[in-house]
Image: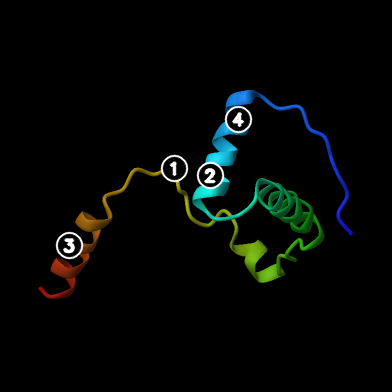
Amino acid sequence: MDTKLTLSLDKSVIEQAKDYAKSNKVSLSRLIESYLSSLTNKRNNDVEITPLVQSLSGVIDLNQKTNSKEDYTNFLMEKHK
């Protein structure tokens, strides 16, 4: 059963949302409903992290600045000496 909801939003946000909904061939109401549904469903569908995955957390330092292409080239050069 659908129920009405009144929202107060910035006028420009409403216009942009209307344009987005129109370009995606969906009503603004369905767009908002879908968004709110996705927000609330994420909380209900929390993924359990297994002990193995948790033990791997933090193994790789993502803050290092690396050049993957250069690293791979160096690896291949060493491999095929």
Q: How far apart are marks 1 and 4 (CA)?
A: 36 Å
75 versus 14 height, above or below? below
- Disc 1: which residue: 63
Disc 2 designates what residue? 20
**Displayed quadrant of residue 65:** top left
Residue 72 in picture, x, y percent from top left:
23, 63
Mark 1 or mark 3, earlier in chain: 1
Is 55 left, or right, of 62 in this rendering? right
Label 1 residue SS: loop
Where residue 10 sits in the image (x, y, percent)? 66, 24
Mark 3 = which residue? Answer: 73
Q: What residue type is labelled 2?
A: Tyr
Please state the horizontal and vertical placement of residue 13, each as a whole percent of the image. Answer: 60, 30
Most foreground residue, 69 or 22: 22
Q: What residue type is labelled 1?
A: Asn
Which residue corresponds to the image point at 52% horizontal and 54% vertical from the top-left? 24
Residue type, numbered disc 3 = Thr
Q: Quadrant of the N terminus?
A: bottom right
For the point 86% across and 55% down, the residue is 2
Q: Name the residue under label 4.
A: 13
Q: What element carries label 4?
A: helix
Residue 63, x across and y down, in percent: 44, 42
Q: What element carries label 2?
A: helix
Q: How far apart are marks 3 and 4 (CA)?
A: 48 Å
Res 1 label = none
Residue mark closest to the camera, 1 vs 4: 4
Callout in the foreground (3, 2): 2
User: How far, Cα to Cα, is label 4 from label 2?
Assistant: 10 Å
Which comes sooner in the sequence, label 3 or label 4? Answer: 4
Q: Are marks 1 and 3 in contact (CB under 8 Å)?
A: no
Q: Which amino acid, by three-letter code, is at mark 4?
A: Val
Give the mark nearest the N terminus, 1 or 4. Answer: 4
